[in-house]
Image (cartoon, rainbow, N blue to C red):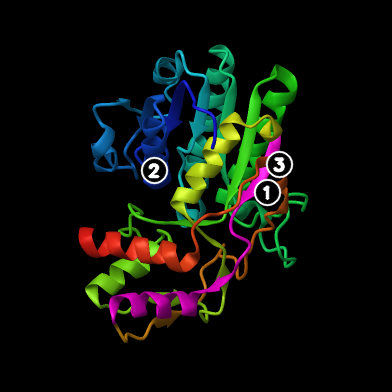
Amino acid sequence: MPKKIRHAFVSGGAGFIGSHLVDALVAQGSKVTVLDNLSTGNVVNLQSVENKIVFLEGDIRDREILDKATEGCDVIFHLAAVVSVQQTIDNPVESAMVNDMGSLYVLEAARKANIKRVVFSSSCAVYGDDPRLPKTETMQPKPVSPYAVQKRVTEQYMRIYHELYGLETVCLRYFNVYGPRQDPSSPYSGVISIFMNKAVEAASPIIYDDGNQSRDFIFVKDVVTANLSSATSKNAVGQIFNIGTGERVRINRLWDMICGLAGLRVEATYRPPRSGDIYESVASTEHTKACLGFAHAHSFENGLKLTFEWYAKNG
């Protein structure tokens, strides 16, 4: 069980992963300040805890509001980002201003406020199209999209701030996170949220490429546990960790499983692959287990069932 955090600041805390993290922090009795510009997050995600947190609507590039949001905190969870790979391809400069400069502003705010630790939500996208599997943290990054480059740049800033200024930093390379509250409205949302929405509507989903590509899917509650452990473990400082399950699921099988949960028999529609997409990905979890003692608690079958139940109820 991770130690209790006194006062946490969560950037992007109204988003899919961030809101689950906020719930967990409130549940353990932490004081929580959330900053979100609501470009992809939604205050509805924080309804159950809205009277127990401080919520600020604003952008991480606004240094004045960042200073206000981080005052008195001991841990920062930095999740705010442009999260769509395609959006970073279409608008590389604009997305870099958020993902790179915004992250640098967060680190500067932490340094000025003498905050003890910053936990950064990075991505397995930094590995790019290196064909070696599983992906280990010691692999040379090979980004193939502006999104991946931007995540890698922030990892380097995290390292520099630890080495130069003594700020305790931790980088978490998420694999494919899924669960309740993931927004399916964008064509570039997580594949599970899109498939769930299609299943509820009994509609055919679009699968890019042949559907045999694979992903390492990890349930959002397990990602929250990894964040909490990273914020309190002595072994985490200065480290980069894969946050995945070490198990592969092919996209065709994913749709078959969701159809089974929904009681459907609907064929997918296939389209050519998208630029920047990776064909196969799976995490090595040995380093994460050894340093954090973290391993996922939810099987894919169980996590998918819980997720479908939420989408079926919320539509």
Nearer mark to the viewer, of 2 and 3: 3
Could you tell me how far apart the alpha carbons at marks 1 and 3 are, in whole angstroms? 6 Å
Q: Residues in magenta?
A: 238-263
Label 2's element? helix
Residue ID for mark 2? 20
| Residue 294 inside the magenta-drawn segment | no
- Determine which quarter of the picture holds residue 303: bottom left
Residue ID for mark 3? 291
Tags 1 and 3 in contact by the CB under 8 Å rule? yes
Mark 2 or mark 1: whose residue is earlier in sequence: 2
User: Does residue 315 appear anywhere in the picture?
Assistant: no
Label 1 environment density (alpha carbons within 10 Å; few <14, some 14–19, many ≥20): some
Task: Provide residue 290's location: percent of width, then percent of height.
Answer: 72, 46
Could you tell me how far apart the alpha carbons at marks 2 and 3 are, in whole angstroms? 23 Å
Residue 29: numbered disc: none
Residue ID for mark 1? 289
In the shown orientation, is residue 239 left or right of residue 71?
right
In the shown orientation, is residue 39 left or right of residue 244?
left
Label 2 environment density (alpha carbons within 10 Å; few <14, some 14–19, many ≥20): many
Label 3's element? helix
Q: Amino acid at mark 2?
A: His
Q: Residue furthest front?
A: 1
